[in-house]
Image (cartoon, helix red, strand yellow):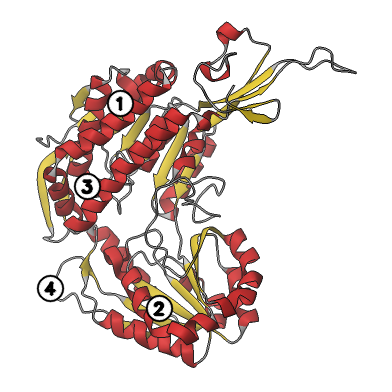
Amino acid sequence: MTITGEMLIGFTAVRGNEGSQRAFDPARNTEIDPAFGLGGPAEVDRAAALAAAAFDPYRNLPLEKRAAFLEAIADNIVAIGDELLARAHAETGLPLARLTGERARTVGQLRLFAKVVRDGHFLRATIDPAQPERQPLPRVDLRLAKVPLGPVAVFGASNFPLAFSVAGGDTASALAAGAPVIVKAHSAHLGTSELVGRAIQKAVKDQGLPEGVFSLLIGAGRKLGEALVAHPAVKAVGFTGSRQGGLALVNIANARPEPIPVYAEMSSINPVFLFPGALAARAEAIGKAFADSLTMGAGQFCTNPGLVLAVDGPDLQRFVSAAGEALAGKAAQTMLTPGIHEAYRSGTAKVDAVAGVDKIAQGVPAGDQPNAAQAALYVTDAQRLLASPDLESEMFGPASIVIRAKDFDELLAVAEHVEGQLTVTLQIDEADHADARRLLPVLERKAGRILANGFPTGVEVCHAMVHGGPFPSTSNAMYTSVGATAIDRFLRPVSYQDLPDALLPEALKDGNPLGLWRLVDGALKQA
């Protein structure tokens, strides 16, 4: 498939005239052809008008048609073959094995949401039949189902060129909800975005769907993205990126005449708590596994373990020594962009400048390798963390800080202090359960996912997964961006009172033509 450098607005390929930009190979420190034409407000208006026109026809299609569309996108992505992986590798520096797995995750998400659509549970079909004889007052017939909010703007993420980008979880869940999607491609992987965008565009055409169900826009800087969030046809936003970028979009959305929700995943340092029993039994093994998790993908994961906390003692030192030794052998890795690499260097420099923080281990120096991150491990005490905001900032890359607490009460105080997180990890043995029970109520207030005896890097796409958490990890802790319930972000409930059966949505009609499990007068029934 030829990469042209064009945007995809509905069924049309459009070359923007607001300047041009080439993709970039961070491993070779060089630009990649072709040049991509950049769009602006005019392209946003065109895509938004098409999306608005497509909304009602698309959302009212049979559920089977919507599910088949999602599966067609998955099939088309697979059909691109090795060309997609090669281009993503060139634009990100990520290993081909990692990208192969990410492609599988991407198509798996699409197929999961196809199943979610077919099952129909997401509609939350609920019927409270009329009770005309009820005293002292009769009850009217009330029926509830969920409907999509409207067209959704999705911002591609830098660190997952497939799974959190053009056809990633935000796009898949919005399309599953019945919402047209306008994607702003991330500049870190423009060619990859076009390839995947054409796969979606082809699926829209082949399935006979309305033209505005999908568009892909390209724009430099913030201008196009800001125009997209501000556009009155857009009713929700999905974003993965920096706290600064996410809050900027939230502010634009809130300043609109009609404010809209922004589901922004922004910043998390994902604390790891090491309990005494676990450290005594396996400090060295935990240290080595931690080093592997920290450096996976050059540390460019939203769930990277950036903070380690434990009560000080010989067993903690065993962990630190093992982790430091393992880290010293880790090669420097190419980061996604020169900008991300510079931000990582700036973040570690701030930590280097904090008095009382010791850098106890580093990975192999990058040497002449461009845009490559050298891993780093720091150690300090709990009081220093509590007094130094720079130690709580996300270092997006392979760096982490070990915090020594004098006792468990101080550890609890640190847990209360830290900001909202995507994940919290517990390294525990059975002997640690009593202390863990004291900590868990705090962690439930602080994180979206709590895991034991593993590491947070790696997010399973399934029904029970939560990839979200209290601010600043996300802008809305009520929802997840990964897993089946991610669809709920783009839905709202509508109640129908005494409507004739002929006018009701299929999910609420008498006779249950869709065969759904419905809540009928408080009881779950397939009737």
Q: Secondary structure at mark 2?
A: helix
Quarter of the picture holding the C terminus: top right
Q: Secondary structure at mark 3?
A: helix
User: Please, is residue 69 above or below residue 225 in the view?
Assistant: above
The residue carrying pointer 3 sits among few (fewer than 14), some (14 to 19) or many (20 or more) residues within 10 Å by Cα, namely many
Tell me the distance, in whole angstroms, between the alpha carbons under discs 3 and 4. 24 Å
The residue carrying pointer 1 sits among few (fewer than 14), some (14 to 19) or many (20 or more) residues within 10 Å by Cα, namely few
Give me the disc on residue 189.
3
* Amino acid type assigned to the residue bearing label 3 in the image: His
Give me the disc on residue 42.
1
Residue 20 picture location, percent across and down? 17, 39
Camera-nearest label, 1 or 3: 3
Q: Secondary structure at mark 1?
A: helix
* Amino acid type assigned to the residue bearing label 2 in the image: Ile
Left or right, 320 with respect to 107, comes to right
* Amino acid type assigned to the residue bearing label 1 in the image: Ala
Where residue 50 sits, quadrant-wise, is top left
Residue 160 picture location, percent across and down? 30, 51
In the depicted view, which residue is nearer to us: 451 or 311? 451
